[in-house]
Image (cartoon, rainbow, N blue to C red):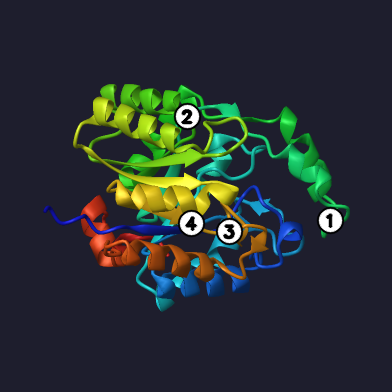
Amino acid sequence: MAKKPKTIITCAVTGAIHTPTMSDALPYTADDIAEQAIAAAEAGASILHLHARRPEDGGVSIDPAHFAAFLPRIKQSTDAVINISTGGSLKNTIEERITPALTFSPEMCSMNMGSMNFSFHPLADRYETFKFDWEKDYIANSDTYIFRNTFADIRNAATQLAPHGIKFEHECYDVGHLYNLKFCMDIGLFKAPIFLQFIFGILGGIGPEVDNLIFMKRTADRLFGDDYRWSVLGAGGAQMPLATTASQMGGNVRVGLEDSLLIGRGQLARSNAEQVQKIRRIVEDLGCEVASPDEAREILGLKGGDKVGF
């Protein structure tokens, strides 16, 4: 029997969508982001996917100064791979969104592979009070937002980031995004091997069913052959079930409070590390080994932590 490949665990520590009101566990100050990222790495995450937030009100930030407040601390305390988001806020331009990656030249950054309706407005009716003044309107009005990632935007980001030797986490929220990526590869924007993040359960994207996971995987096989590695992000309650399934299909997994605030049905997670510990336990109990940061670097062909700008 062939040995299963080692499973890379990515932890998305704090995100551009969820707000502190929804869970006190979600970090938004530099201290909390650093502490939770380090704890997640110690729990078994070999990649840390990071956004920044404004410390005064928890709002999404693409200000390099806010990233600088926690990136060096994380690097000094762990050898985990740092993956900086280029997603930012739904209101930021692509030029604004890639500024942190251009500033800090991380080993990895996210690359969204298509424009889409990206809405979380139903959350506005679940809460009577909000911690910060901006939150309710931002959430309630998300049904008017378009998450813009045009071909021109993708080309702009890829071209500016290319000299940095950054490995992209190609975030694909629907099957059409895989075809967008194939087109971008055909015109020379990205080179194999690539790293795909299949995303399920975002309103506006593909639903969180196992059939859809199989469909996305088969489509990627057809388009990219053996020249890719892949991971799965399930939003909300789909996080652990889809991650478990992906790990048994030879894929990698992403957990973290950016993607789900839960640790079990109706139960809020106490930290990012708790989610990492749970998926690691599941993966190992089912006979797979978890990749270390250096093993993840080798699997994905990363430039190394000594070549970042922080």
Q: What is the secondary structure assignment of the residue under circle 2? A: loop
In percent of width and height, residue 83 lies at: 43, 55
User: Which dot marks residue 130?
Assistant: 1
In percent of width and height, residue 136 lies at: 82, 46
One can see residue 173 in this view:
yes
Q: Amino acid at mark 4?
A: Val
Few, some or many residues within 10 Å of mark 3 (<14, 14–19, 20+): many
Q: Nearer the viewer, mark 4 or mark 1?
A: 4
Few, some or many residues within 10 Å of mark 4 (<14, 14–19, 20+): many
Q: Which residue is mark 2?
A: 174
Which of marks 3 and 1 precedes in the sequence?
1
Few, some or many residues within 10 Å of mark 1 (<14, 14–19, 20+): some
Spatial CA span between label 4 and label 3: 7 Å
**In this view, 19 is above or below 189:** below
Spatial CA span between label 2 and label 1: 31 Å
Q: Which residue is mark 3?
A: 257
Q: What is the secondary structure assignment of the residue under circle 1? A: loop
Q: Residue at x 47, y 73 (%)?
A: 38
